[in-house]
Image: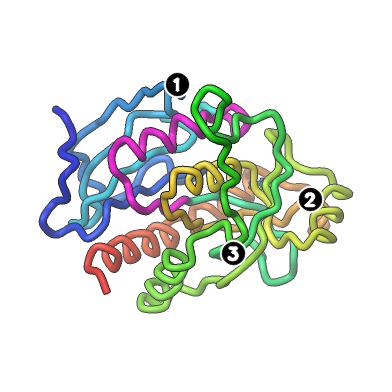
Amino acid sequence: MGVNLARSPNAVRRIAIIGGSGLQTLDNFDIKEVVDCTSEWGEPSSPVYRGYLEGNEIFFMPRHGGEQAIPPHKVNYRANIAALEQLGVESILAFNAVGGITATYGSGVLAVPDQIVDYTWGREHTFWSDKNGDLLHVEFTYPYDQDLRNELLSSAKKINIKLQGRGVYGATQGPRLESAAEIIRLEKDGCDIVGMTGMPEAALAREKNIPYACLALVVNPAAGKSTELISMDDIRAVMAEGIPRAQQVLSASVAELIAGP
Ligand code: HPA
């Protein structure tokens, strides 16, 4: 069945959620359609799921595919953003699990970053090619959409979920975690949190002119920020507690966006 690009009567905006580690599926998500969106940019991480999240229509894309199979440096970010563009998506809420660097970003903290430093390399990071027209130096002073960020913050406040209202996201290449010295460098650069999937996703959304914001869950102290080494068991425990809170914020934000101002 083809997707109807006309707006559904109650939807103010076509909203997509990009799920990250720990959020490969959404609770209370009633899937109505599974849309295969392969494009000239290749295969996205997964089909896009159109359905209703607590009654509100959204599109859902799990960034790492079905079972966390695709590592951060192998995600086809271009195909993923192109898929959402094809479906007429007008707003993207991206979820990312991250490590915490500075003092107020301890494990379990939810944050809505306002800036990015990009340390990734070798990823297909632009839709521009010399075959497809004029070079676009996309404006990226404020990498995240301010209105969407405000929506995440105000929706969380309404449901009494605490968020850090800003933060600098350092995007590293992975898939390995960082060394302690690398984290010291990131901190000196002004980074508050570190993750592997924030870029080039945010920049590609900007190239397509799709407003994009990130909800990040701190799942571990970054390398060297704790007396313990980073443990997957500890990360899983933090996720088990934090992911439901992240979902509540996403769901409340979707409801507010669709209800409109
Ligand atoms: N570093 C990079 N990416 C991450 C981390 C981290 O410590 N935790 C979760 N994603």
Instruction: Identify the mark nearer the N-term, 3 or 1.
Output: 1
Residue 76 horizontal/vertical position (percent): 51, 29
Is residue 72 a member of the stretch shown in magenta?
yes
Q: Say what secondary structure mark 2 lies in.
A: loop
45 left or right of 203 in image: left
- Amino acid on which the number 3 mark rests in the picture: Asp
Q: In which quarter of the image is the C terminus?
A: bottom left
Q: Say what secondary structure mark 1 lies in.
A: loop
Between circles 2 and 3, the one closer to the viewer is 3
Q: Which mark is residue 140?
A: none
- In this view of the protein, can residue 101 be seen by the observer? yes
Instruction: Identify the mark nearer the N-term, 2 or 3.
Output: 3
The residue under label 2 is 223
Q: Residue 114 carries which label?
A: 3
Q: Nearer the viewer, residue 145 or 99?
A: 145
Q: What stretch is highlighted in magenta?
A: 71-94
Q: Say what secondary structure mark 3 lies in.
A: loop
* Quarter-of-image position of residue 186: bottom right
Height in image: 126 above or below 191? above
* Quarter-of-image position of residue 74: top right
- Amino acid on which the number 1 mark rests in the picture: Gly
22 left or right of 50 in image: right
> Which residue is pictured at 32% across the width and 66% down the height?
252
Height in image: 202 above or below 241? above
Between circles 1 and 2, the one closer to the viewer is 1
The residue under label 1 is 42
Confirm if mark 2 falls within 8 A of ligand 1: yes
Spatial CA distance of label 1 from label 2 is 34 Å
